[in-house]
Image (cartoon, grey):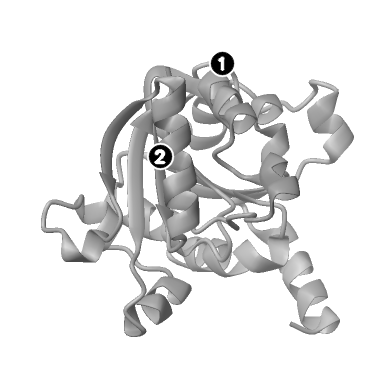
Amino acid sequence: MGSKNKLKRFKENETFSNVIQPKRDEVTSGEFALKGKWNADFFKNENPLVLELGCGKGEYSVALAQQFPNKNFIGIDVKGARFWRGAKTAEEAGMKNVAFLRSQIELIDHLFGQGEVDEIWITFPDPQIKYKRTKHRMTNSEFLQMYKKILKSDGVVNLKTDSEFMHGYTLGLLHGEGHQVLYANHNIYKNEGAPAEVTGIQTFYESQYLEINKAITYIRFKIK
């Protein structure tokens, strides 16, 4: 994407009512006004709150919001030019139950209050295969403890990925740390029992993977 196009998207994001772009120091200083008040002050209802971490173009957040009108969805990504697509689609469709937050995932416990979130989706994250990159792996122990802080006691996490490595790493970690695996499958499109929102929603890249018969994996779990 050219820099001109990026700038255009950044400018357009600023006009969208569903895009929130706090400054880093506002978040880290504890002054972020929506923390603990997303439903009361932004969505203006008490529906379950669901996050998509590293939402990319926002396709999954928008599709989930369409499928579940009685839930609130927030797609989070550090790259605003990426989620511009999802934000624009949702804005044009007049969807009131989906928003996009530009921030780093590492700051998530500064953005949401304790027990504020009902569910988390992690869709096609970078598997960070090299050992020295493990601290960036979105299902490592540190991230799981961060998610636990913001999740309700019965909150769940969904991991959908095309990476067998990420699937195996996460499953091993979950079992090793005693977390509760509710569902796991390393090829959901070959399994009839997969949840509808897992097989019924496909990102642009996912449909490309399926064309070349690449297996899509899925885990649903609770953090103990």
Camera-nearest residue between 44 and 118: 118
Q: Is residue 12 left or right of residue 121?
A: right
Q: In this view, does 59 lie to the left or right of 111?
A: left
Number of other residues with Cα within 10 Å of mark 2, as a class: few under 14, some 14 to 19, many 20 or more: some
**Residue under label 2:** 171
Rendered image: mark on residue 213: none
Note whether 92 is above or below 50 in the view shown: below
Q: Is mark 1 on a helix, strand or loop?
A: loop
Q: Which of marks 2 and 1 is nearer the N terminus?
A: 1
Q: Is residue 134 visible?
A: yes
Q: What element carries label 2?
A: helix
The residue sitting at the right extreme is: 25
- Quadrant containing the N terminus is bottom right
Q: How far apart are marks 2 and 1 (CA)?
A: 25 Å
Note whether 102 is above or below 224 in the view shown: below
The residue sitting at the left extreme is: 192
Residue type at mark 1: give it.
Answer: Gln
At which x and y percent is residue 195? 20, 50
What residue is shown at x 43% (from left), y 37% (from top)?
172
Q: Is residue 182 left or right of residue 101?
A: left
At which x and y percent is residue 179? 39, 23
What residue is shown at x 64% (from left), y 58% (from top)?
16
**Residue under label 1:** 114
At which x and y percent is residue 28? 82, 27
Camera-nearest residue between 143 and 129: 129
Number of other residues with Cα within 10 Å of mark 1, as a class: few under 14, some 14 to 19, many 20 or more: some
Residue type at mark 2: give it.
Answer: Leu
Q: In this view, does 77 lie to the left or right of 124?
A: right
Determine which quarter of the picture holds residue 13: bottom right
